[in-house]
Image (spheres, rainbow, N blue to C red):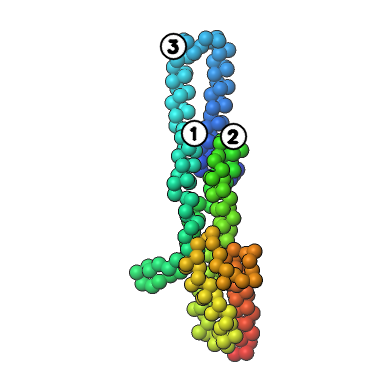
Amino acid sequence: IRDRVLQLRDLPPVASVATLSRITENHLQALSQQIEILIGPSWKDTPEGDSFLNKFDTILSKFNADNVSSEYLNNILRNKTAALDVPILKVLYNGEKYELFVNFDFSLGTIFKEIRNLIYMGYDIPNDISKIARKYRAFYPSAVLLLEQIQTFMSVMRELPKRPHTGIILKSQIDSIWTLLLEAMNTSWISMPKDITEGLKNDTFSSIIEKRLAKVLEDFAKLQRIEERLV
């Protein structure tokens, strides 16, 4: 039941462990107070009290919230600081053909939630880790959107040979997209090439790709309908 409650509260894994640990500690403290009423103020010095304390320690040791959170934070500093200093896109060979992928670890999308919840729980979070969390929060939506748009763009490219007129009209836009995608294979998430982003200096490079992909996909949908009516 508790796991289900934590899921409904949308708590990520580390924060869930810390929350369960706090809940358990509160329950055990309440039990200690009840034991004190039954046995007396010196209950911890009695054989029965010693048995209860050992059981309490055993229960709490199953969580190790402080160890889990400390290991998690250290792991962020060790492995995640450079995770955004990688090309936005990458090409991989799957054994049959080359495919274009968004070069982003989507499993890291929970970092901001983890840090935010740990701060609320009173954990001391180093400033460097807070900065990393904010960066992931900023780039995660762009990575998800870019993934969807590239998949749709590739579908459009497979459809274009059937739409010769649409292909001619969109040629300059598509060429521009391919130039951007090529540049994205050599551009990290946290950098922005000035020659590509001229006139859009307030946007990140990834957001520029998103906007131009969105425009060509929108235009393709309109022209596709027009060309279908002409055939």
In the rendered image, which residue does mark 1 sit on?
66
Image marks 2 and 1: residues in contact by CB distance under 8 Å: no
> In what element is the residue under mark 2?
loop
**N-term-proximal mark, 2 vs 1:** 1
> In what element is the residue under mark 3?
helix
User: Residue 198: image x %, image y %?
Assistant: 61, 71
Instruction: Say which mark, if any, is on residue 47.
Output: 3
In the rendered image, which residue does mark 2 sit on?
122
> Position of 199 compared to 2: left or right?
right
Residue 218 or 142: which is nearer the viewer? 142
User: Residue 56: image x %, image y %?
Assistant: 47, 23
Q: Residue at x 50, y 84 (%)?
A: 161
Q: CA distance from mark 2 to mark 1?
A: 11 Å
Q: Using the rendered image of the protein, determine whether residue 78 is visible from the camera's viewpoint.
A: yes
Going by the numbered disc 2, the residue's amino acid type is Gly
| Position of 231 relative to 33 (above/below) | below
| Position of 27 relative to 110 (above/below) | above
Q: CA distance from mark 1 to mark 3?
A: 29 Å
> Position of 49 compared to 119: left or right?
left
- Residue 190: name its quadrant: bottom right
Q: Residue furthest bottom?
A: 231
- Residue 61: name its quadrant: top left
Residue 131 or 36: which is nearer the viewer? 131
Looking at the figure, which quarter contains the N terminus? top right
